[in-house]
Amino acid sequence: MTRASLSPSLQTGKRARPRALGGALLNWIWLGLILGAVVYAALTGRMEAVSTAIFDEAKGAVQLVINLTGVMVLFLGVMNVARDGGLLDAAARLLRPLLQRLFPDVPSDHPAMGAMVMNLASNVLGLGNAATPFGLKAMSELNRLNPHPGVATDSMVLFLAINTSAVTLMAPMGTIGVRAAAGSAAPMAIWIPTLIATLCSTTAAVGAFYLLRGRRRYALRPRAWEGPEPDAAAAPDAPDDATLALFPAEYPPLGSRQWIVVLGTCAALAVGLALEVPRLRAEMPPDEVLETITSHWLTPLLIVGLLLVGFGRRVRVYESMVAGAREGLALAVRIVPFLVAILVAVGMFRASGALDLLVRGLDPLTSLVGFPAEALPMALLRPLSGSGAFGVMAEILETHGPDSFVGLLASTLQGSTETTFYVLVVYCGAAGIRDVRHALPACLIGDLAGAIGATVACHLFFG
């Protein structure tokens, strides 16, 4: 989503205040890294190392994107096949009963409910790009039920809390791609820890919503705004009802050819797995068999499973894959400026020795809770900038190794939550919401719980 595609409320005037908060804070962090690196290097005589790091990190950022592009193109293409085959629609059907309980103020047949179902189903399946337009539509439709325009309702706050905490069942393919490009022996190892972290963050965010909504300072009441009342118009990106009906309720039944291919493939894989287990047991200790099977089999099985979903529904799998792959290529191009900016800043800060100083100062405190100080920049940036955190994660993997504990923790943190300030700003701006009530504290509590969950899960799985 580009700045030009956002509603005017995100670009000018007082309604842009949330965007200014997140953006200004990130600007200060990025500028502080560069200024701190140059000043500390000047005082310690390490200016040559900083100068070298500028060019090395800029070149390394582009090289990282080149290595990452192929993985992103492949997996986004395969995911598009499953989406065309109705996987997103199936997830939406499963989520609808739960959402009707969570949002009793929203009629089950209201367009807001349909948009929320599609948004959360997209998030659960890891389709972040599909989730955003549905989220914008949901917020603008929720505002039509709002008795106090400009003030977030309970349903809006809960919807935002769930979106920023982002339960995702599918493997975080972007992070896994970076780990593979960095030479990880087990790129998929962070899948289950990431799932645990997202469950922790979502549980905490939803719990914080119910805990805070009864406090007087967060009561739902009209506010005296300066200037005209905010409107409820959706942002230009928000889909209309035709878009919400993109995934039909009925798909072609499996024909004999589809049944033969699907069942034959599953049977062959089951036989192969049955033969693989005894062989591995003869070669390695029993406690390593499951880990080996997971690391070697999970990625191929995931690809095959997603392709079979599309093939079973008679999707033209090759054409659908290519269409989704184009999105992966565009995404890879878009992240280049962000990666260059953050990797150069972090690289300068590390080359100057200032990062080592900061780590030594914080290590006694963070070590008490099992959180290495080297991963602290990742935890701090994640709520502010997804691309910034992505760059810090890439830098950590390059410096410490993708399979080190710090690298595994940074990879898990990347998928533990969404970018809180981005979600709040874009979604609330689309609906003209100025007062988010208790959405921000609920979302930040979810961020903290996600970091704690990621730390605990990494200790459980990786020691």
Image (cartoon, rainbow, N blue to C red):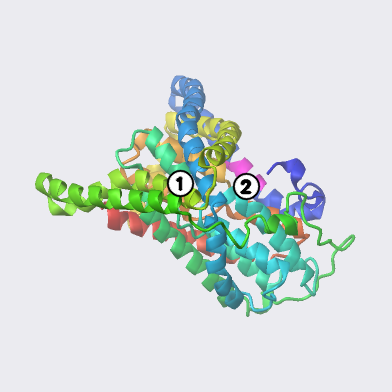
Q: Does dot 1 land on a helix, a strand or a loop?
A: helix
Q: Is residue 135 visible?
A: yes
Q: Earlier in the sequence, mark 2 or mark 1?
A: 2
Q: Is residue 27 magenta?
A: yes
Amino acid type, mark 1: Leu
Estimate the spatial distance between the alpha carbons at disc 2 and disc 1, rounded to whole Å.
42 Å
Q: Nearer the viewer, residue 318 or 419?
A: 318
* Location of residue 148 with respect to 337 vertically, above or below: below
Residue where numbered disc 2 is placed: 25
Tell me: 32 left or right of 16. Answer: left
Residue where numbered disc 1 is placed: 307
Q: Nearer the viewer, mark 2 or mark 1?
A: 1
Q: Which residue of the protein is positioned furthest toward the left in this rendering?
A: 282
Amino acid type, mark 2: Leu
The image position of residue 191, as x and y in percent, is: 38, 52
* Location of residue 185 with respect to 414 vertically, above or below: above
The image position of residue 243, as x and y in percent, is: 70, 54
Q: Is residue 166 magenta?
A: no
* Location of residue 210 with respect to 273 vertically, above or below: below
* Residue at image coords 87%, 63%: 229
Tell me: 146 left or right of 259. Answer: right
| Residue 117 falls in image quadrant | bottom right
The residues colored magenta run 23-29
